[in-house]
Image: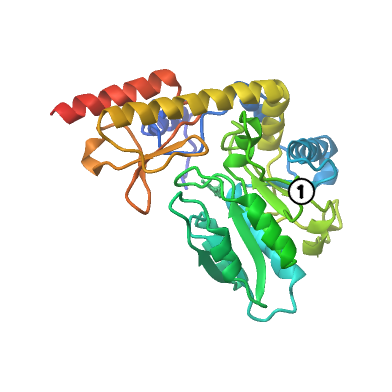
Amino acid sequence: MLNKGQSEEELFAFLAQKKSEDLDHDFILSSMCTIPHSVAVRAHCMFMETNLGDPGLFPGTFSLEQLLVRRFGSLFHCETAGGYATSGGTESNIQALRLARVQNCGIREPNVIVPESAHFSFKKACDMLSLEIRPAPLGRDFRMDADAAAGLIDKNTIGLIGIAGTTEYGMVDPIAGLAKIAVQHDLFFHVDAAFGGMVIPFLDRPAPFDFSLAGVTTIAVDPHKMGMSTIPCGCLITRDPHLLDSLNIDTPYLTVKQEYTLAGTRPGAPVAGALAVLDYLGTEGMKAVVAGCMKNTERLIAGMETLGYARAATPDLNVATFSCEKDAVPVPWRVSWTRQNHLRAVCMPHVHAGRVEAFLLAMQEHKKR
Ligand code: PLP
């Protein structure tokens, strides 16, 4: 702690210096987050001091959170869905497994079945909740093998997880088939659509992944990914509007008597930001954003293949992966690498057509050296 405070000028010069050390989004192809939409930033600034952890003090902000949940309920074909705004996919996935755990509290050695492609947040969730994690293998198309998943179910299985938009390869698991299995075995079925939930509904031919399928219990969706909200904003959406009540604990000194959320203090600002983007763009605007991202993904795949870098998968969503040596990517471009060592590039909204061409040109120039 400084003994004497700094001048505002000095302080902000320091902060600006630190910000300039961050990577320019122009070169970031590795992230599932993006530059927030301008309406999200404006809404965020309006609600900066709000705390959804004490909703009685901020009834207006709380009604925005409920509206956000209603928007997702409607987008995911269940007008009566419940849910709340989380800090992102990790919290949504933890809470979903917590729900599955509470519903099956009689089982002493519970396990959950997740695809091998599952985001690492499930490892955290299983660790915290003492759940055995049973990874189901993927098919050659990088999608979860539904039959193999069914084969892993036993009397101690409390939940099944499918991914609608995998982090590494942008694939949508066979959610319809998994939902059927969940119904047959009366299992809690959580769909992690943290990434895909804001992409799939806006595609020309969306694969079924939501509450239109009997058997889907909960869905994770992240406005702070393809929803272009400010960070942090995820949502956990439940088919049963009262499901979350099973997580309630008493909150003696707040304006509410009980709370089911994981975090206590929760920011209202990104929730306002998320809703602002949805209501500003509407379905038409989101379809245009998603169509642009998909077109850029296709162009990136075609361009990389022309350079001799074969695609690793033909993705369902805007994630492109390639067989490529690590030193083939020039500085300052930032891509990531999958567990199978494929180059991974996510065509987020900030990766517009011009950036894709710039990347391809940089790859070509670098190859000549
Ligand atoms: N689920 C999926 C499919 C993801 O891709 C991610 C992050 O990329 C997460 C969950 C975790 O989200 P967060 O980092 O917002 O907690």
Foreground residue among 298 and 240: 298
Question: From what the image shows, is residue 279 above or below residue 191?
Answer: above
> Given the current orientation, which residue lies at the most extreme bottom position?
108
| In the depicted structure, whether residue 79 falls above or below residue 261 | above
Q: Nearer the viewer, residue 85 or 143?
A: 143
Left/right of residue 343 with respect to residue 50 in the rendered view: left
User: Is residue 175 left or right of 294 when viewed as pictured?
Assistant: right
Ligand 1 within 8 Å of disc 1? The answer is: no
Tell me the element at label 1: strand
Q: Residue at x 44, y 32 (%)?
A: 15
Please state which of residues 23 and 102 is positioned toward the viewer in this rendering: 102
Q: Classify 10 Å Cα crowding around label 1: few (below 14), some (14-19), many (20 and above).
A: many
- Work out whether 121 lies above or below 156: above
At a point 23% along the width and 43% down the height, the residue shown is 325
Q: Is residue 11 left or right of residue 52?
A: left
Of the residues shown, which amino acid type is indicated by label 1? Gly
- For mark 1, what is the residue? 83
The image position of residue 203, as x and y in percent, is: 61, 30
